[in-house]
């Protein structure tokens, strides 16, 4: 392997191939590139195909070219390279309707394809010195050690969610993991988390019982809404999860209460407070910028040690 001589970090960036993970990863890649990083961003062939198809269908308003989400960023001078890798399944395989099988493939097969492409990239480009991978991936430590790369784990969700994942054993021990009959319990045993209820927990999949309650409540509340659902929201084996009839009253009451003027006014005030906090954090010299500056400094120190 060639000596790595570079004046700036060059990161291979591999997101988790789901939309909620991909968008933050693209934003971070652009942010890092704007601070002097070279980024080689690797999408799965399936995600690339979906983006290409979507962009071709809305070509008049789309800034993506041939599925490359960084085409415009490169025009501004950012050094972001783009590559694709197989996730182990054919393009025609329906990953949404077969979510469970798709996840199994990502956890047990995808790493071999990543290993191959990372190895080829490192062999051809001696400037590569770090690997940024979504924290949902199970292989980054192994591959970063194999190719002597600085390993950077990127968590795309709120810190609260990470804390809940970390203490999943406590949720299971107390019967609050995916529970249908303990919605009014108080969860006050998670370190660093204020008291919450099981109904406050958000899962990528939900039960048919909960989905039915929401559907009933929305209909009876007479509130105008647009509801977008993944076909596998309940499970890969149940793609028609919405109920035929509607009768639940509890969710209806909560939705009507939420839409009351006094309640919505209170929520708007809370939202404004949160918005102000976020704006302060993102301002020049704010906590977000300071933390990001510190992160970049630490990465540069570690990559320089690998020269």
Image (spheres, rainbow, N blue to C red):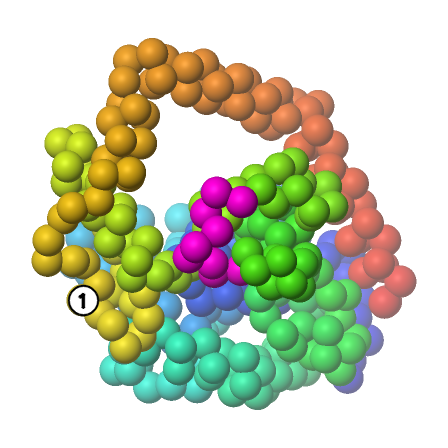
* Magenta-colored segment: predominant secondary structure: loop
Identify the residue at horizontal 22%, vertical 70% (top origin).
239
Identify the residue at horizontal 14%, vertical 48% (top origin).
246
**Location of residue 45 by image quarter:** bottom left
Image coordinates for residue 155, horizontal then vertical, percent = 61, 54
Image coordinates for residue 168, horizontal then vertical, percent = 63, 60
Figure check: 295 above or below 179: above
Would residue 65 appear left or right of 270 to someone viewing this image?
Answer: left
Mark 1, Cα crowd under 10 Å, few <14 / some 14-19 / many 20+, is few
Identify the residue at horizontal 48%, vertical 43% (top origin).
184
Q: In this view of the protein, which residue sits in the foreground, 74 or 101?
A: 101
Visible in this render: residue 86?
no
Would residue 91 appear left or right of 203 to someone viewing this image?
Answer: left
The span shown in magenta is 177-185
Q: In this view of the protein, which residue sits in the foreground, 11 or 213?
A: 213
Would residue 249 appear left or right of 129 to someone viewing this image?
Answer: left
**Location of residue 219 by image quarter:** top left
- Quarter of the image that includes the N terminus: bottom right
Figure check: 133 above or below 271: below
Q: In this view of the protein, which residue sits in the foreground, 265 or 80?
A: 265
* Residue labelled with disc 1: 240
């Amino acid at each position: 392997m060639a000596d790595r001589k570079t004046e700036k970090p060059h990161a291979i960036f591999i997101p988790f191939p789901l939309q909620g993970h991909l968008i933050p990863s693209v934003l971070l890649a652009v942010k890092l590139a704007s601070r002097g990083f070279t980024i080689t961003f690797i999408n799965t062939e399936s995600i690339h195909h979906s983006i290409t198809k979507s962009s071709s269908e809305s070509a008049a308003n789309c800034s993506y070219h041939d599925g490359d989400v960084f085409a415009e960023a490169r025009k501004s001078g950012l050094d972001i390279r783009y590559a694709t890798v197989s996730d182990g399944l054919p393009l025609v395989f329906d990953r949404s309707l077969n979510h469970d099988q798709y996840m199994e493939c990502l956890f047990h097969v995808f790493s071999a394809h990543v290993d191959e492409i990372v190895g080829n990239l490192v062999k051809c480009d001696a400037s590569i010195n770090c690997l940024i991978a979504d924290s949902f991936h199970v292989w980054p430590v192994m591959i970063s050690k194999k190719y002597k790369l600085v390993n950077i784990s990127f968590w795309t969700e709120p810190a609260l969610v990470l804390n809940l994942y970390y203490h999943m054993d406590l949720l299971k021990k107390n019967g609050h993991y995916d529970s249908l009959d303990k919605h009014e319990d108080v969860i006050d045993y998670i370190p660093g988390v204020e008291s919450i209820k099981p109904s406050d927990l958000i899962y990528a999949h939900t039960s048919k019982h909960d989905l039915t309650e929401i559907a009933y409540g929305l209909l009876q509340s007479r509130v105008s809404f647009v509801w977008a659902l993944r076909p596998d929201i309940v499970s890969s084996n149940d793609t028609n999860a919405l109920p035929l009839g509607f009768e639940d009253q509890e969710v209806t009451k909560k939705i009507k209460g939420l839409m009351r003027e006094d309640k919505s006014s209170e929520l708007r005030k809370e939202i404004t407070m949160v918005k102000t906090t976020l704006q302060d954090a993102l301002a020049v010299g704010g906590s977000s910028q300071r933390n990001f500056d510190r992160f970049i400094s630490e990465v540069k120190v570690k990559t320089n040690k690998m020269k």
